Image (cartoon, rainbow, N blue to C red):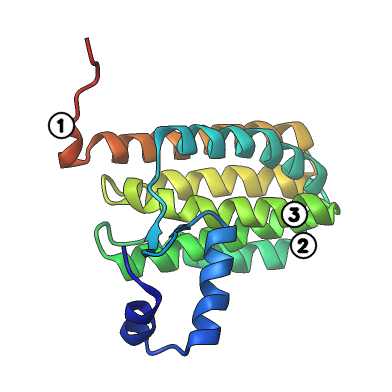
């Protein structure tokens, strides 16, 4: 828990821009305001993981189906290049660069759907998912799997096969959910948490 003045001093930010940033973080659910105490990072729960991936399963396949045959091959190939390079597990900077590239790849697909509201909601959802991905990426290197997933999705999109694009997207979201859950279950502190209160 950090009071505003400590946050401002730590990050070298003035009072007005700090408050603006904190309001946005609270609005996005990433930070909680504690009255007369300060702010704390919102903890991630299993329910959060379930909710986020349930939403992705509802929205991303629909966006991929709509984008099939409508996306620019050159743009998609260019956005996929950093994803092909992969990341170094445990290196936060490498993971962040990889996740940003992955998000931009998927946002481009959502934008190609032609539904601006769907694309905007998916972009926000994918931004929120990055926090969860950091837990999973450290457990194992998924570069090869994600490379194959992107190639399959690109093939379906460029061929105009909406059904195949939607199915590939479902498989990708399921694999990502499993990776995040594996990351959570691998956390050392979790070994001491009681699973029942009998």
Of pointers 2 and 3, the one earlier in the residue sequence: 2
Q: Residue at x 53, y 58 (%)?
A: 102
**Which residue is at the front of the view, 20 or 94?**
20
Q: Quadrant of residue 24?
A: bottom right
Which marked residue is nearer to the observer: mark 2 or mark 3?
3
Of pointers 2 and 1, the one earlier in the residue sequence: 2
Which marked residue is nearer to the observer: mark 1 or mark 3?
1
Residue that mark 1 sits on = 191
- How many marks can you see? 3
Give the secondary structure at mark 1: helix
Would you call the spot at circle 1 few (<14 residues within 10 Å), some (14-19), or many (20 or more)?
few
On the rendered structure, is 105 left or right of 117?
left
Rendered-image quadrant of the N terminus: bottom left
Task: Check the image and name the residue furthest to the top.
Answer: 198
Q: Residue 84: image x %, image y %?
A: 46, 60
Can you say whether 27 is above or below 198 in the image? below
Q: Residue 19: image x %, image y %?
A: 53, 77
Residue 119: which numbered mark, if any? 3
- Labels 1 and 3 touching (C-beta < 8 A): no
- Labels 2 and 1 touching (C-beta < 8 A): no
Rounded to the nearest whole Å, what is the CA distance between mark 2 and mark 3?
Answer: 16 Å
Q: Residue at x 26, y 45 (%)?
A: 139
Can you say whether 56 is above or below 77 in the image? above
Rounded to the nearest whole Å, what is the CA distance between mark 1 and mark 3?
Answer: 39 Å
Rendered-image quadrant of the C terminus: top left
Rounded to the nearest whole Å, what is the CA distance between mark 2 and mark 1?
Answer: 47 Å
**Which residue is at the front of the view, 6 or 91?**
6
């Amino acid at each position: 828990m950090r009071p505003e003045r400590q946050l401002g001093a730590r990050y070298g930010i003035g009072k007005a821009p700090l408050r603006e940033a904190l309001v946005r973080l609270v609005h996005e659910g990433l930070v909680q305001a504690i009255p007369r105490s300060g702010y704390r990072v919102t903890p991630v729960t299993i329910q959060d993981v379930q909710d986020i991936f349930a939403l992705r399963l509802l929205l991303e396949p629909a966006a991929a189906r709509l984008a099939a045959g409508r996306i620019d091959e050159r743009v998609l190939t260019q956005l996929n290049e950093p994803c092909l390079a992969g990341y170094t597990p445990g290196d936060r900077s490498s993971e962040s660069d990889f996740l940003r590239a992955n998000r931009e790849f998927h946002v481009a697909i959502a934008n190609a759907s032609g539904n601006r509201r769907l694309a905007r909601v998916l972009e926000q959802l994918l931004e929120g998912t990055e926090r969860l991905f950091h837990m999973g990426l450290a457990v194992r290197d998924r570069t090869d799997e994600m490379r194959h997933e992107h190639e399959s999705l690109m093939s379906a999109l460029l061929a105009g096969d909406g059904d195949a694009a939607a199915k590939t997207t479902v498989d990708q979201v399921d694999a990502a959910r499993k990776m995040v859950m594996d990351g959570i279950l691998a956390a050392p502190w979790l070994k001491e948490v009681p699973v029942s209160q009998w």
